Image (cartoon, coloured by chain):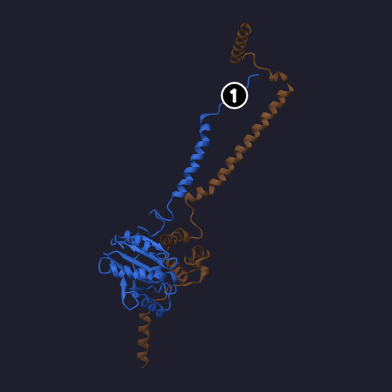
Chain colours: A brown, B blue
Amino acid sequence: MPVLLAVLLSASVLAASPAPAPLTPLQQAQVSRIGESIRCPICRDVLPITESGNDISHQMLAEIRAQTRAGQTDNQIYAYFRERYGQRVLLRPPVDWAGTLLWALPVLALLLGGGALLRYLAGQRRAAGVDSLAAADPALNAEDPEDPYLAEIRAQVQTARERRGGT
Amino acid sequence: MTRLHFTPPTWRRFAPPALAFVLVAALGAALLRPKDTSSGTGDPLLGQTAPTFALRTLDGGTLSLAQLRGKPLILNFWASWCVPCRDEAPLLREVSEQQGGGGLNVVGVLFQDPDQGRMRKFIADYGLAYPNLLDSDLKTSINYGITGVPETFFIGADGLIKSVDRGGLTRERLSAGLKTIGVTF
């Protein structure tokens, strides 16, 4: 009887699927890190699967554990869920060119706008300085006697006056 | 005194409109960029090969996607506790009865529904004759990116997902989905 029991017990042990190897502390940390970044897909609130506690979140965590045990990297596991649920499943979307551009554009616009405003204000100040200098020194306001364009206008005005005066 | 007239270099004249163009182009590209996917229509699974499954039926048998290949397929995720599933059940029964003999498979997958008694009652109440599968470990639901029920996948005879309806089906939405897999309803 004990022999039969031993045979039965060993057969049942062999038939049972082997328990998965326990995760190393590093792998545990990877599971926690990824689990905290994956959104519960059926929750109304934005909750990570580590906090939601429903069946599908548990299963998703089990999937992360299995993939971590199999040596998958964070990015590979994120890609696995993104392929199925889309970007919305990621609580921390990965950095890509479009996202970077979207974040950088307002900062860039602020810098450019600020720079342009400063230049404009500096120009205004400079112009105001020149005007006050000109007001103080009438010589600066004098028209340039060498200006050929001005001379031509003067000549034309003079001619027109003379004609009017002659008629 | 002659006032010096400063002529800005050519690049400075073109810089503001060029910058405005770049900004508008970037915003336009971001707005027009398809959401989530390269297929261009918003759902990550659209245009992809339907994820395989082999699940137990309520009757104790097993049904796999491989067994359903060659015909268009409606794969409907539902639960007996789901109210919109009750609204669309008569439509699914109608289409399965109308098209079942011809060229369409209709299959239901139970999502997070622990009560088999309620499932069976639901099926009896609406007279659903098509197979309904148990996704006990929810792996199939994860593979199809289920975010709630009901959700329905319209899979072409070639095994590609042609259309996805997330939310309760109406006659119009069912008809539109069926059209993508070449079925008139």
Circle 1 packing at 10 Å, graded few (<14), some (14-19), many (20+), is few
Against A141, is A63 above or below? below
At horizontal 59% and vertical 40% (from top left) the residue drawn is: A113
Q: What is the quadrant of the N terminus of chain B in the image? A: top right
Of B120 and A46, which appears nearest the observer? B120
Of B178 and A67, which appears nearest the observer? B178
Q: Quadrant of residue A150?
A: top right
Spot occupied by residue A67 in the image (x, y as percentages of width and height): 42, 66
Spot occupied by residue A92 in the image (x, y as percentages of width and height): 51, 58
At horizontal 65% and vertical 35% (from top left) the residue drawn is: A121
Residue at the outermost right position: A136
Of A137 and A21, which appears nearest the observer? A137
Q: What is the quadrant of the C terminus of chain B in the image? A: bottom left
Of A28 and B137, which appears nearest the observer? B137
At horizontal 57% and vertical 46% (from top left) the residue drawn is: A107
Which chain does the residue under circle 1 lie in?
A: B
Amino acid identity at mark 1? His
User: For the image shown, how many numbered marks are present on the structure?
Assistant: 1
Q: Secondary structure at mark 1?
A: loop
Spot occupied by residue B11 in the image (x, y as percentages of width and height): 51, 32
Residue underneath mark 1: B5
